[in-house]
C-alpha cells in the first residue's frame, strides 16, 4: 500500500501509531511471557535499588501481571492490525478513515490519562515528583504515555495533517451519510 492510501494518518502519526506504539506495547508482553519474565516485570513497576527477588510471584500477582500483559498485547494488536485494516479497506475514503481513527484515539486517549493517573498514584511519595529516580518501566508508563496522549491530542487538533472529518464543516465532510 502506498502512503497515499492512508491520508488520515500521515507522517509522524503513521510512524508513531502504526509502528512505535505497537512495538512499545507488544514488547513488554513478550518480555513477560518469555524473558526476563513476570517476576522481573512485577518488580520493575515501582523503581527500587534492590535486585529482583529470585522467588516466584504468588498466584494472584502472577495472574494480575499476565492479565496486564494481555492488555498491553491487545493495545499493540489494535494499533497494528486494526489501523492497517482501516487503511486497506478504505484507501479512497479519508473521512471514514479519520472517523474510525478518531473513535480509536478517543478511547486510547482516555485510557492514556487513566493509565498515567493510576501509575502516578501507585508510586510511593518519595518517587512521585522525582522522575530522575524513575526506571524505564515508570518512564514508559508515565513519560511515554504522556507523549502518546500529546500526539493523539495534536492529531485531533489537526496539527501537521489535513483534516477530512474532525474540524471540517459538516457540509464539506466527504463520505458523510445523512
Image (spheres, rainbow, N blue to C red):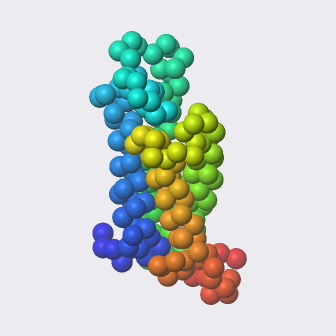
Q: Residue at x 62, y 83 (%)?
A: 168
Q: Name the residue rendered at 42%, 40% in the picture.
A: 135
Q: Is residue 115 visible?
A: no
Instruction: Name the residue at 39% across, 66% down.
Output: 14
Q: Position of residue 61 (x, y in %)?
A: 52, 20
Quadrant of the image containing the C terminus? bottom right
Residue 31 locus on image (x, y percent) = 33, 33
- Expressed as whole percent of the image width and height from the top left, the position of residue 71 reads 50, 38
- Give the answer, above or below, for where 64 lies relative to 152: above
Residue at point 43%, 60% (across, down): 17
- Direction from residue 50 to residue 61 in the image, left or right: right
Q: Nearer the viewer, residue 143 or 57?
A: 143
- Quarter occupied by the N terminus: bottom left
Q: Nearer the viewer, residue 66 or 47?
A: 47
| Left or right of 33 in this view: 138 | right
Confirm whether residue 102 shows in the render: yes
Which quarter of the picture shows residue 20?
A: bottom left
Q: Is residue 176 above or below residue 152?
A: below
Q: Position of residue 24 (x, y in %)?
A: 38, 48
Amino acid at each position: 500500500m502506498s502512503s497515499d492510501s492512508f491520508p488520515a494518518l500521515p507522517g509522524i502519526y503513521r510512524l508513531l501509531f502504526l509502528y512505535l506504539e505497537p512495538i512499545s506495547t507488544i514488547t513488554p508482553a513478550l518480555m513477560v511471557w518469555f524473558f526476563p519474565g513476570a517476576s522481573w516485570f512485577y518488580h520493575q513497576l515501582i523503581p527500587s535499588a534492590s535486585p529482583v527477588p529470585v522467588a516466584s510471584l504468588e498466584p494472584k500477582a502472577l495472574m494480575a501481571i499476565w492479565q496486564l500483559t494481555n492488555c498491553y498485547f491487545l493495545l499493540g494488536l489494535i494499533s497494528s492490525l486494526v489501523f492497517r485494516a482501516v487503511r486497506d479497506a478504505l484507501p479512497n475514503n479519508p473521512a471514514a478513515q479519520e472517523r474510525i481513527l478518531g473513535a480509536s484515539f478517543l478511547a486510547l486517549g482516555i485510557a492514556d490519562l487513566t493509565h498515567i493517573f493510576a501509575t502516578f498514584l501507585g508510586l510511593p511519595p518519595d518517587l512521585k515528583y522525582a522522575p530522575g529516580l524513575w526506571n524505564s518501566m515508570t518512564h514508559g508508563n508515565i513519560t511515554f504515555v504522556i507523549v502518546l496522549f500529546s500526539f493523539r491530542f495534536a492529531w485531533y487538533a489537526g496539527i501537521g495533517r489535513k483534516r477530512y472529518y474532525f474540524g471540517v464543516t459538516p457540509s464539506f465532510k466527504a463520505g458523510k451519510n445523512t
